Image: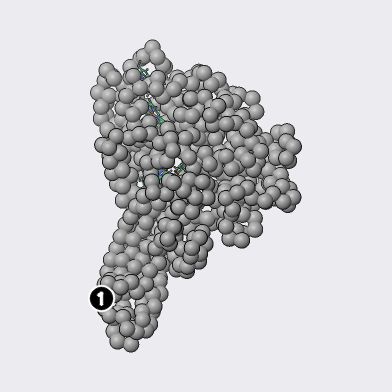
Amino acid sequence: MRRVSPSRPARCAFSFALVLLVTLLAAAGCSPEAEPKTDAGTTVDATDAGGYARLVDPLSMPLQPTVQLDHFRSAGDCAGCHPKHHDEWSQSRHAFAMIDPVFRALVDLRQQEREGQEDGFCTQCHSAIGVRSGDIQPGFRWKDLAPVTLEGVTCEACHKASAIERVHNSGHVLDDDGPLCGNLENPQTVAFHESAKTPHMGEARFCGGCHDVVETNGLPLERPYEEWLASPAAAQGKPCQDCHMPRYDGTAALGGPQRQGLHRHRFVGVELPVGPGAPALDAATRSELEAEIAALLGSAAKVQLALPKPARGGEALDVVVTVRNAIDAHSLPTGSTFLRQVWIDLEVVDADGAMVYRSGDLDANGDLRDHWSEVDPYGDDDLVTLSSQLLDVAGNPTLFTWHAAEHRRNAIPAGHERTWTYFAPIPATTKGPLQIRATLRFRAYAPFLLRLVGLGQMVSDVPIHDLAKAATAVDVTAP
Ligand code: HEC
Ligand code: HEC
Ligand code: HEC
Ligand code: HEC
Ligand code: HEC
């Protein structure tokens, strides 16, 4: 079996026992995995009829509420005085964290399988307010959630973070009665809220508190902060904010003083909010956002093709491709690398324009021809991908983090490069010169993944970006 089925996976007694064992071991601070990097902080409460233990974490998944829902204000309450921050945030993926249809589909699957006992896990970062206030309960339904919970990573999920206890799995302390944290010099006083100088707001570990994700069995899923710690950017003191929250000069609040170095709040990354529930963007905003994403992605990589030796008809041509991660701050790719696709599309074309060799092209469904392809599985033996792969206990690929026992990574660390050699067979009759083109391509979601979670209609909303390209030509000598 190569593929997980879209329906509920079979729950044999073995997997039941395993799930329980893993949870208990994680709770005891050890795991059957190789040394977990961190303690996922999970403990076990009452066990339900199905044998699943409710996940509890005193900071991020408390059994009893630690904050009060009505102490958090909606982003809409900030818009009157901070219109630019509000507009930008509402176009960001942070505002979409609890709406995102792919997120919802996966949470629904986990909810079904684990009978709601792990419902706090995925939501602890996507809505820390919802989980800690008890608005999100085992077996919760999306339509019953409070508006501020559905605002996801909303203003006060960040600006009421008074301390950082751990740099993963929703590691922030949320002070529901506290002042709003920021770093303005002498902020104007305002009756609506108190302000507090909070240096961690400007640091990478503030982002890492949510951006580093560790599964309940200790398996690291997303580690941009850990990658950053070892990067040249960390050595230069260049945090996440420098690239994902570009600076501008203006006013922080309507009528406030002119200031330098304010922070854009679109949190530009790799994609627009797309699919059902996405905000309606006017054409100008949409093209601005697309341009910001394209610029960020365009800065991520360099591709080089070594000058090949002349090809000989009837033999294989060596094509040597090097990809350099031009980001000095984290791996390429980073974040949810098991959902993203980053791959090399390599073409060798003869003098008549006929394709002599191809790797990294798409099948009739728009999928890569790897093990997930429904029409040509394993059809592209040479495929080079930088995406990561989750494997279950039996070693089969899975997309579901809660089935994963191993995370196989292919990303290139900050500032590093990697080289691959393709052996492209050249038929004896081929007419040169050959054109060789290598393109590093990215997309947020593969079509098979969207179909798997019942969102096939979104396929056309997910663009493919060309991160970097290289081209060269080579003569063909007679066999
Ligand atoms: C520790 C905090 C945290 C936890 C726990 C967490 N996430 Fe996320 N999630 C994030 C962050 C941060 C991102 C953005 C990363 C990126 O875009 O690569 C993200 C992105 C995603 C995305 C991609 C959305 C997009 O940008 O297109 C999906 C889908 C998702 N998460 C689903 C889940 C599911 C399902 C779970 C539970 C198995 C989960 N998350 C648990 C923090 C978390
Ligand atoms: C009545 C107007 C008003 C409202 C409503 C308002 N703010 Fe403010 N806020 C201000 C002013 C004025 C400042 C100080 C601006 C300056 O000095 O440049 C400020 C400063 C801030 C700061 C910087 C604090 C610091 O110490 O650096 C943050 C963060 C902030 N506001 C967030 C919010 C959030 C989140 C909301 C909604 C929950 C909100 N504000 C609602 C007027 C308002
Ligand atoms: C993902 C976390 C996050 C969210 C969500 C968020 N902010 Fe911020 N905000 C920041 C960070 C980080 C800074 C910069 C802090 C620093 O200067 O070190 C900041 C700065 C600010 C400032 C100070 C002026 C500036 O631009 O530097 C204001 C005002 C502010 N935010 C308002 C808001 C409002 C209003 C919302 C919601 C509409 C919001 N923020 C949502 C993280 C967030
Ligand atoms: C030097 C600029 C720079 C800094 C600093 C930086 N990033 Fe990035 N980031 C990028 C670029 C470029 C991309 C797009 C390429 C990619 O996905 O790796 C990106 C992509 C991302 C993504 C989206 C990944 C995906 O495919 O979903 C996340 C999440 C992210 N960064 C988080 C962080 C965090 C957290 C930090 C700080 C620990 C950080 N970044 C620091 C440049 C930067
Ligand atoms: C309270 C938790 C939380 C904090 C704090 C946080 N993030 Fe996020 N971030 C998320 C989640 C959850 C998502 C994924 C939302 C989605 O698309 O479903 C996300 C998405 C993103 C993305 C979009 C990636 C993409 O898919 O394009 C970027 C960029 C990003 N965050 C940057 C930052 C930076 C920079 C900081 C620190 C200033 C930060 N975040 C702090 C939770 C958080």
Locate residue 132, reporting x and y percent: 57, 27
Quarter containing ligand 2? top left
Which of the 4 image quarters holds residue 467? bottom left
Q: Which residue is mark 1?
A: 351
Locate residue 182, reporting x and y percent: 39, 26
Residue at (34, 19) in percent of width and height? 80
Judging depth in this view, the residue of 319 and 144 nearest the camera is 144
Residue at (50, 40) in percent of width and height? 103
Locate residue 63, reporting x and y percent: 65, 28
Is the residue 269 above or below the residue 420 in the image?
above
Q: Residues within 10 Å of mark 1 (few under 14, many from 20)?
A: some
In the shown orientation, is residue 201 left or right of residue 453? Answer: left
Which of the 4 image quarters holds residue 314? bottom left
Judging depth in this view, the residue of 51 and 453 nearest the camera is 453
Residue at (57, 39) in percent of width and height? 108
The structure's colour scheme is one colour
Which of the 4 image quarters holds residue 67? top right
Judging depth in this view, the residue of 146 and 61 nearest the camera is 146
Is the residue 413 above or below the residue 475 in the image?
above
Check disc 1 and give the amino acid type.
Ala
Q: Is residue 128 visible?
A: no
In the shown orientation, is residue 133 left or right of residue 266? Answer: right
Residue at (27, 17) in percent of width and height? 255
